[in-house]
Amino acid sequence: MTPNSNDFTLAIHGGAGTILKSRMTPEKEAAYHAGLRRALEAGRAVLADGGAALDAVTAAVMALEDEPLFNAGRGAVYTSAGKQEMDAAIMDGRDRAAGAVAGILGPKNPILAARAVMEHSGHVLLIGESALEFCRRQGLAFEEAQYFFTEQRWQALQDTLAMQESGTEDTDESRKHGTVGAVARDRHGNVAAATSTGGMTAKSPGRVGDSPVIGAGTWADDATCAVSGTGHGEIFIRYAAAHEIASRMRYAGESLEEASRVVVMDMLAPAGGSGGIIAVDHAGNFALPFNCSGMYRGVVQADNALRTAIYRDDLKDVSASA
Ligand code: ASP
């Protein structure tokens, strides 16, 4: 469906590493839908007011980072050394301005760190201690390690290390990874994308995934689309996944839906790139393809209905739920 030119679209994801359906309980499922709903509300408040896509994706990702259920900010996964190293990126489709951070622990909202890099550093990507120093100078809010801790992620690390030790293959996507992201098209026709993650459980210290790599896990250009990815980051980087979608639209004339489907299903999946993407184009169309069992996801457009989904089922309207 192509919305009217003055309409807006916001799509979000809470990662492609969903809990196995057999282990999902009604209570947990409700909590995930509620977490997605709060993020949609945060972004909708900006867009409904005529605000910028860039501010909407920032607000939506902050809400997801604050929610411990998702692997970003509070609730991020652990490296093999038992530390959290977070990556985030943001991109403005108006002028392809971009900012990113990698390997950080401290800023309460890593997406604000990425945005500060974009707006105040003169660079695109800052890493580690120097990125933290920059964030302190920018006056960003910091939290202690305890704030980011969740028992569930710590346990996932112990289980993963034990499985690696015994040579058992881990088939539980929720233990392995996750990420959060948002893409938006505002009432002015501009698009933006934001992605934030703890990366993959038991990753090597210093490993950087696709999320902060512009063109891999995050991309926005008003001429085509805005994209945020989630999944096996190494493959998303090697296939320049987000930029590939924009390129197929630009050079091959494919629609957003077609370009997204081809990249996720025909390129990433055969290469072992389990995961998915969310995308919006400059007209406000959206696509949410994934090639694994589920992806926490949601959409809101100018009709105001908040719609979320986890597995292969259709988006359902959660506007009325508490
Ligand atoms: N793409 C993230 C990474 O590789 C993880 C994920 O989205 O599941 O760091």
Image: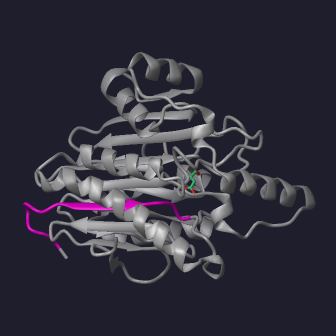
Q: Does residue 85 show up?
A: no
Disc tally is 0
Residue under the point 67% across and 57% down: 152
> What percent of the width, then of the height, locates residue 192?
28, 48
Q: Quadrant of residue 112?
A: top left
State yes or no: residue 247 in magenta.
no
Q: Does residue 11 show up?
A: yes
Specify the farthest residue to the right: 166
Reply above or below: 195 against 48: above
Q: Quadrant of residue 318?
A: bottom left
Which quarter of the image is occupied by the C terminus?
A: bottom left
Q: Nearer the viewer, residue 152 or 236?
A: 152
Q: Nearer the viewer, residue 18 or 249?
A: 18
State yes or no: residue 9 in magenta.
yes
Q: Is residue 253 left or right of residue 194?
A: left
Q: Quadrant of residue 122?
A: top left
Reply above or below: 319 against 176: below
The residue segment tinted magenta is 2-16
> What percent of the width, then of the height, locates residue 54?
26, 44
> What percent of the width, then of the height, locates residue 278?
39, 62
- Give the overall secondary structure of the magenta segment: loop
Residue under the point 62% across and 38% down: 146
Residue under the point 29% across and 53% down: 42
Give the colour scheme of this rendering. Answer: one colour
Q: Is residue 236 left or right of residue 146?
A: left
Reply above or below: 150 against 267: above
Q: Is residue 142 left or right of residue 209?
A: left
Q: Nearer the viewer, residue 116 or 289?
A: 116
Residue under the point 47% across and 73% down: 30
Which quarter of the image is occupied by the N terminus?
A: bottom left
